[in-house]
């Protein structure tokens, strides 16, 4: 499932490319036909994210609310003025990329005259089209046209977002996590405690802060909980900037590479049975609430 940094990148791309434009909204698949009709022909004013929820606000007060879930993804394209990612979400097809494209690549400058979006391929739930580009949504868990009070109700059910900082959010997170006796490894995945963290950030932040994932939230002192929040803000902000999750320092990357290869990008995530990058221990893995949890007992004991 895309983590919060990807949804904030989505919001940024929609804001940059579609805000201020009147959009044609359709549902080639048909499942969103009624909602598309409500949004069709209206101007997109703003795009925003809270955790893993995307909100596109239109000029008549309605929102397009999207939660990608495990399989949802947006794909994009357009004319020479349309620059940005060709796809954001999961899974992406070969050749699609979440980072900005160069001319001649998917999502970069079109090689020839732009004649509008291509014919829909697959089950396109929603299609948004402006005079310069298009966006197709497939596989989302949630795709709905909702009112402003309904959008506010969705956000009210969520915890603070490390990428959408508001006064008091740090203290709110500390209070929410320390009020619960549930293992902190579960609490970080609870969107009502903190919005946007997924399996990778959960494993990596707890490792970087030396926190045992099985520790009850109520057993964390305020200082430790605050460090978890601060590191989450830093790690997810890096993800927004880079378009991928890299939690290791450059000293652990391949010599002369200039960027982290997939095998070098994380301390513990998907490294079960391999040596810990910090100690002589071995990275462990366990199932917790049907998700895989990765940690090092030596560093997080």
Image (cartoon, helix red, strand yellow):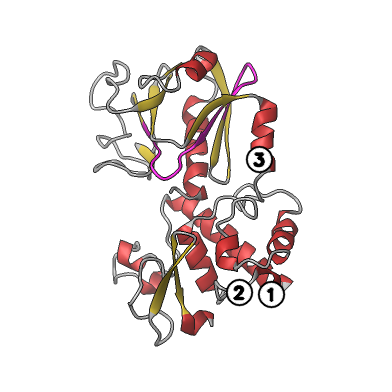
Mark 2 secondary-structure assignment: loop
Q: Which residue is mark 2?
A: 215
Residue 158 as seen in the image, left or right of residue 123:
right
Which residue does the numbered mark 3 point to in the structure image?
155
Residue span colored magenta? 56-75
* Sequence-first tag of 1 and 3: 3
Tell me the residue at 40%/69% (across/down). Answer: 250
Check contact, mark 2 vs mark 1: CB within 8 A: yes
Q: CA distance from mark 2 to mark 1?
A: 7 Å
Return the residue at label 1.
Answer: 219
**Picture coordinates of residue 276 (x, y %)?**
39, 80
Of the image marks 2 and 3, the number of the one nearer the N terminus: 3
Q: Residue at x 27, y 41 (%)?
A: 93
**Does residue 66 show up magenta in the picture?**
yes
Q: Is residue 180 left or right of residue 141?
A: right
Q: Is residue 95 above or below residue 220?
A: above
User: How dense is the environment of label 2, judged by Cα within 10 Å: few (below 14), some, or many (20 and up)?
Assistant: some
Secondary structure, mark 3, is helix
In the rendered structure, the answer to whether residue 266 lies left or right of residue 51 reads left
């Amino acid at each position: 499932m895309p983590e919060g940094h990807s949804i904030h990148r989505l919001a940024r791309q929609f804001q940059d490319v579609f805000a201020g434009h009147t959009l044609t909204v359709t549902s080639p698949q048909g499942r969103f036909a009624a909602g598309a009709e409500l949004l069709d022909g209206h101007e997109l004013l703003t795009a925003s994210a809270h955790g893993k929820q995307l909100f596109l606000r239109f000029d008549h007060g309605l929102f397009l609310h999207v939660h990608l879930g495990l399989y949802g993804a947006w794909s994009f394209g357009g004319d020479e003025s349309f620059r940005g990612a060709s796809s954001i979400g999961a899974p992406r097809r070969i050749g699609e990329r979440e980072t900005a494209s160069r001319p001649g690549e998917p999502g970069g400058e079109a090689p020839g005259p732009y004649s509008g979006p291509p014919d829909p391929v697959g089950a396109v739930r929603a299609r948004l089209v402006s005079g310069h580009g298009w966006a197709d949504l497939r596989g989302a868990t949630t795709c709905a046209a909702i009112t402003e009070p309904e959008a506010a109700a969705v956000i009210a059910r969520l915890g603070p977002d490390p990428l959408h900082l508001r006064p008091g959010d740090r203290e709110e997170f500390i209070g929410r996590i320390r009020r619960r006796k549930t293992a902190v490894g579960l609490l970080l995945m609870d969107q009502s405690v903190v919005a946007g963290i997924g399996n990778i950030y959960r494993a990596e932040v707890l490792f970087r802060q030396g926190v045992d994932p099985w520790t009850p939230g109520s057993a964390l002192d305020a200082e430790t909980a605050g460090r978890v929040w601060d590191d989450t803000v830093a790690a997810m902000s890096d993800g927004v900037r880079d378009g991928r999750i890299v939690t290791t320092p450059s000293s652990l990357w391949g010599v002369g590479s200039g960027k982290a290869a997939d095998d070098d990008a994380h301390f513990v995530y998907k490294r079960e049975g391999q040596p810990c990058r910090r100690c002589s221990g071995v990275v462990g893995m366990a199932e917790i609430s049907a998700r895989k949890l990765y940690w090092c007992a030596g560093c997080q004991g």
